[in-house]
Image: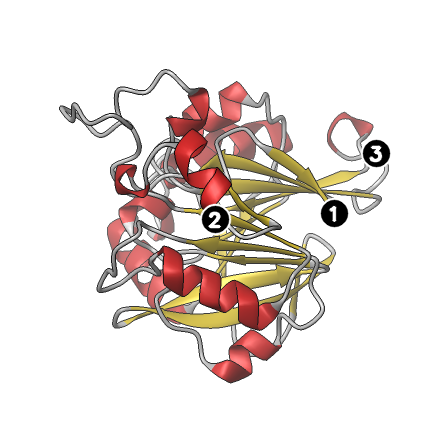
Amino acid sequence: MKLTFLGTGTSQGVPVIACRCGVCSSTDPRDARLRTSALLQLDGHGEAGSTADRRTTNILIDIGPDFRQQMLRHRVQWIDAILVTHAHRDHVAGLDEIRSFNYVQHRRMDIYLNAEARHTIEHDYHYIFEPHQYPGLPEADLHTVGDGPFTAAGVEIVPIHAMHKDLPVLGYRIGQLGYITDANHIDTAELKKLDGIKVLVINALRHEKHFSHFCLPEALEVIETVGPERAYLTHMSHEMGLHAEVQPTLPKGVFLAYDNQEIQL
């Protein structure tokens, strides 16, 4: 299983428009962050005779406004399913672009999300779900995730329920990987679902406390509680600081994720 960080930035990305801070002016590619999204690739799950006769399953986590750029950058040829953490624009604004995959794959896109995200998407992208379809519109099937494990593209996934201030959001456990973003509270029972994982990806907005996202000390506390072998911080703002300066200060086994980074599990 391979996870590729397609984007590791906040809703504004890094650099931030019109910002002249040291991070936004950095020439280190690890400091340039598109909006948060990730691609999970699992060998041995695809069906023989499917697209390009491939046997790898591609599962996308979030589909933000940089989706088109991310797909072209990584030359992604198919997507089997999309997991949505929540329906804020920086996580779903690329939804209209799935029509390219609809055309190539000759099928509708399966999207997994909670009830709150489904309500928002059905409202904001109402034209996709209206009974009289205009030719060429995106085609998607929305699947509401409950409390228990579910299967997407033949892969078992465990939902992790968390809070983004007052908004319920979803994290996901896929095998030995846990992925959580845009959270600032996770109940103990939900954290227990991550017992035994090897890799945890979790949001850390900045050093200082924030009203709706984990800050760095809070993210490190969650990492210590879960106890993965490795942890990667994502959804970072320019206020986190320069990668080269912050990374050496982190505990052993904890890393600032960066765009285009690949990790194997």
How many marks are shown on the rendered structure?
Answer: 3
Q: Position of residue 141 (x, y in %)?
A: 50, 54
Mark 2 or mark 1, whichever is nearer to me = 2
Q: Quadrant of the N terminus?
A: top right
Q: Is residue 93 above or below residue 180?
A: above
**Which comes sooner in the sequence, label 3 or label 2?**
3
**Which comes sooner in the sequence, label 2 or label 1?**
2
Q: Residue at x 68, y 57 (%)?
A: 229
The quadrant holding residue 16 is top left
- The answer to whether residue 144 of the structure is visible from this angle is no
**54 or 18: which is nearer to us?**
18
* Residue type, numbered disc 2: Leu
The residue indicated by pointer 2 is 233
Q: Position of residue 130 (x, y in %)?
A: 33, 52
Q: Which mark is residue 76?
A: none
**Which comes sooner in the sequence, label 1 or label 3?**
3
Q: Which mark is residue 49?
A: 3
**264 or 158: which is nearer to us?**
264
For label 2, the crowd category at 10 Å Cα-Cα, with few meaning under 14, some 14 to 19 and many 20 or more, is many
- The answer to whether residue 231 of the structure is visible from this angle is yes
Q: Residue at x 48, y 39 (%)?
A: 247
Q: Secondary structure at mark 1?
A: loop
Q: Position of residue 152 (x, y in %)?
A: 65, 57
The residue indicated by pointer 1 is 265
Q: CA distance from mark 3 to mark 2?
A: 37 Å
Q: Secondary structure at mark 2?
A: strand
Q: CA distance from mark 2 to mark 1?
A: 16 Å
Mark 1 or mark 3, whichever is nearer to me = 1
Residue farthest to the bottom?
Answer: 189
Q: Residue at x 63, y 32 (%)?
A: 78
Q: Is residue 219 above or below residue 64?
A: below
Q: Residue at x 32, y 37 (%)?
A: 241
